[in-house]
Amino acid sequence: NEKNRELMLAAQAERDRLTSLINNISDEVWFTDANRQFTLANPAAVREFKLNSAISTIDKLATDIEVLRPDGTPRPIEEAPPLRALQGEVVVSQQEIVRTPARDQLRYREVSASPVRDNAGNIIGAVSVVRDISERKQAERYQHLSAEILGILNDPLSLPDAIEQILAAIKQETNFSAVGIRLESGEGFPYFTQTGFSDDFLMTENNLIALDKEGGVCL
């Protein structure tokens, strides 16, 4: 009858609005059923993991990608937020480090996951929302590094000792394998101090001024 038709149209309109919201949100949205199968992934998730129409299971996806805890240690699959939500846990802002297929680099991510229950209270799945926070984490590291460098400069240290400590702080915070500092002094502005560079690299790159065979400066 007409009333049922109106109810069906209203329900369809509500589903369309929900679908539009999920598809246009910049965060990843995942739905996992009780069998640990991903049955829904919004476009943000599909792009980040280069998914096709055959969405994977939690177990397969976890073995196909590199997933780390915030401290850099490997994260066991049982700690995955969707699996914890399937056990009834509400996960809020859990951080993880993942090498996603779309970027092929480790990215910091923040995951929230909740169980989905039917009218009887039975868990029928889990919904997860994931946000990339790599830029925020980088800004936090740089802020911490700036504060650490200011602390070193305020200490009563000799210039060589202060620069050595600053180099060590930069190397630790950035995870760079080699860092160096040049001063505006000396012919060619060679490294005042450095750590991690090979002898071969220093032979060719220590001097910023290139000379020709006659010893003249190359312009």
Image (cartoon, rainbow, N blue to C red):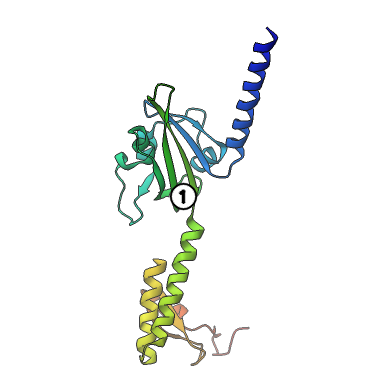
Q: Where is 1 relative to 35, above or below?
A: above
Q: Quadrant of residue 79?
A: top left
Q: Quadrant of residue 179?
A: bottom left
- Relative to 50, 16 lies left or right: right
Q: Nearer the viewer, residue 15 or 196?
A: 15
Q: Where is 99 relative to 12, above or below?
A: below
Which amino acid, by three-letter code, is at mark 1?
Answer: Asp
Q: Is residue 197 something one can see in this rendering?
A: no
**Considering the numbered disc 1 on the image, is that residue within a helix, a strand or a loop?**
loop
Residue bearing mark 1: 104
Residue sticking out furthest to the top: 1
- Relative to 121, 218 lies left or right: right
Q: Quadrant of residue 197?
A: bottom left
Q: Nearer the viewer, residue 93 or 150?
A: 93
- Relative to 216, 140 lies left or right: left
Image spot of residue 170 (x, y percent):
41, 73
Q: Where is 214 relative to 173, above or below?
A: below
Residue at 48%, 56% in the rendered image: 134
Which class describes the residues within 10 Å of circle 1: few (<14), some (14-19), or many (20+)? few
Residue at 51%, 38% in the rendered image: 29
Residue at 30%, 53% in the rendered image: 73
Residue at 36%, 55% in the rendered image: 70
Q: Where is 15 relative to 212, above or below?
A: above
Image spot of residue 211 (x, y percent):
54, 85
Image spot of residue 177 (x, y percent):
38, 68
